[in-house]
Amino acid sequence: MARFLIIQNDPIEGLGLYGLLLSDEGNVDVVHPYLPGASLPSAVSYDAFVIGPTPIPANDAEGHAFLARELRYLSGVIGSGKPILGVCCGGQILSKLLGGDVKRSPSKEVGGYAVELTDAGRGDPLFGGFPSSFPVFQWHSDMFTVPPGGEQIARSELCPIQAFAKGTVRGVIFHLEVDHLDAARWADAYPAELAAVGKTKAQVIEECRSRERDMGRLAEVLIRNFVDLAA
């Protein structure tokens, strides 16, 4: 049975449905490297890795001891050729490790939006079975670039680079794994982010709730595809 490691980089921003879905496919361990005394387990024991978000900007990661350690750890994982999925800032971290950049997105995205696959994305195994356009939840100001030698596999009008692929590494800026309870928790934690985009807590919760069923179905497809990458 496959073993998966989830690296949760923040107490508020977990990986919700992705963790539950992975537990149906194999054994899942979740580590919290931001906690005092926490350590990252040997990567040899795992078949695939999911890297969670954090409100700390990826460009500031080296200034935070736990993320600096994580960067070194992930460099080794990338070198192993095992599948890795980075979500939001997790994807930004992976892009940087692969030689890409993280920069300000043309538009800050908070709430419900739509993302579409590129030509490369329609042929990418992570998005097998996805429609060409699909609903997502967003909460970010920055975006990654496609690392050298990689491919852009999803885009949107407001944030042009939504996902990349390089080898066995995938990064996505969007969320399919959240529900309206997650949206409410994030809204309580980051009220200034709501003000910056001119939305209310109730509006963001409803934007998530109205997309929740479709996002959940797509999260199942994505995780099955990711597990196949690890097989």
Image (cartoon, rainbow, N blue to C red):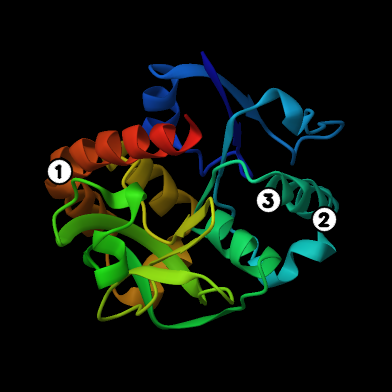
Mark 1 or 3: the one toward you: 3
**Residue 38 rendering spot, x and y as whole percentages:** 81, 31
Residue 44, quarter of the rendered image:
top right
Q: Secondary structure at mark 2?
A: helix
> Label 3, on which residue?
78
Q: Nearer the viewer, residue 119 or 221?
A: 119
Looking at the image, is 84 positioned above or below residue 198?
A: above
**Residue 102 rendering spot, x and y as whole percentages:** 59, 76
Q: Which mark is residue 68?
A: 2
Q: Nearer the viewer, residue 53 or 201?
A: 53
> Around disc 2, counting alpha carbons within 10 Å, would you say few (fewer than 14), some (14 to 19), or many (20 or more)?
few
Viewer can see residue 118: no
Q: Nearer the viewer, residue 174 or 54?
A: 174
Q: Residue at x 47, y 73 (%)?
A: 141
The residue under label 2 is which amino acid type?
A: Ala
> Label 1, on which residue?
214
The residue under label 3 is which amino acid type?
A: Ile
Q: Which of the two labelled residues, at mark 1 and mark 2, occupies the earlier sequence position?
A: 2
Q: Nearer the viewer, residue 55 or 159?
A: 159
Q: Secondary structure at mark 1?
A: helix
As drawn, is 196 to the left or to the right of 64? Answer: left
